[in-house]
Amino acid sequence: MKLATLRDGTRDGSLHLVSKNLQSAYCVASIAPTLQYAVEHWATVEPQLKKCYNLLNSGALSNIIAFTNCQLESPLPRTYQWADGSAYVNHIELVRKARGAEMPNSFWSEPLMYQGGGDSFLGPNDNIPLRDSTWGLDFEAEVAVITNDIDMNIKISAASESILLITLVNDVSLRNLIPAELAKGFGFFHSKPSTAFSPVAVTPDELGDAWDGAKLHLPLYSYLNGQLFGKPNAGTDMTFDFTQLITHAAKTRILTAGTIIGSGTVSNCDRSVGSSCIAEQRMLEKIAKGTITTPFLQVGDRVKIEMLDHEGKSIFGAIEQSVICHI
């Protein structure tokens, strides 16, 4: 299934099923008014949603609307838990190498993870506000999963079954604010503003053999001002898969239905596929030439993040955002 939240003036929007080709949408408020309600009652509502989804794709439903005309929230406009990992250690290694720092061996055996702000996500087509151009605005193209309720200390063998939906992420970062925050020893806050997610979240069965229960094996495309910036494969060089990220997050706490776990910036060792964020491209420039030439995002820049299936069709729809000045 493909699920989206349409903007309707309320905090949590209205839940709609979206056709496989991303052309049509159907309101399912009578089954589940919001996606948060759906994931909290998944065992009950999933069969009903699936039946409607099949009818939508067969053209048997009335009262459908054109999805391309919809004003969208992120699939979950807000959540009780947004935790973003850093599963691609190649990305971390590049960051540290650029500043001449060694990488601790523990980074290969235990994932990094930060707890983000889940109270106000950006919609997939919302502008990215920027107050100060010196803050180093960057995009980060990622994959994320949405889970059901998870017990503390869940086993890896059970973690895959907890994944209800998969989506894409633009984990917006303010790179030049990060060092001072990390130096305080208390993690990100100012440097991680509101995150955006793709137009739809999809159930694992929508991905076919590209989803192996723990990784999504397809290229993730990022574009900057209409030009391809990178297309690393999300299933390649992923040091910690989603089952490992979930068990890491649940080590000392339960995770409630609607928890979103992000992969971190998708990154491949193969440099020819490009990057999923500007910071990584800048690191590669510094390592190769000693000089950084790619600037961070400025007002007027446009970012697009998308994933295509084996037939070249969009799976999640595209995150398409422009940077605007926020006074």
Image (spheres, rainbow, N blue to C red):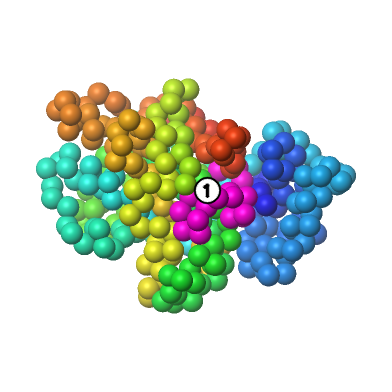
Q: Is residue 215 left or right of residue 102?
A: right
The amino acid sitting under disc 1 is Ala
Quarter residue 32 falls in: bottom right
Query: Does 188 appear above or below 22?
Result: below
Residue visible at 71% across and 33% down in the picture: 69
Residue 183's spot in the image, x, y percent? 19, 53
- Span of residues in magenta: 198-216
Classed neighbour count for the residue bearing mark 1: other residues with Cα under 10 Å, few (<14), some (14–19), many (≥20): some
Residue 254's spot in the image, x, y percent? 47, 74
Q: Which element is circle 1 on? A: helix
Q: Is residue 8 left or right of residue 121?
A: right
Residue visible at 50% across and 56% down in the picture: 212
Q: Nearer the viewer, residue 307 or 137?
A: 307
Q: Nearer the viewer, residue 164 or 65?
A: 164
Q: Is residue 178 visible?
A: no
Residue visible at 77% across and 62% down in the picture: 48
Q: Is residue 202 magenta?
A: yes
Residue 108's spot in the image, x, y percent? 25, 58
Residue ID for mark 1:
210
- Where does the C terminus fall, quadrant-wise? top left
Residue 83's spot in the image, x, y percent? 42, 59
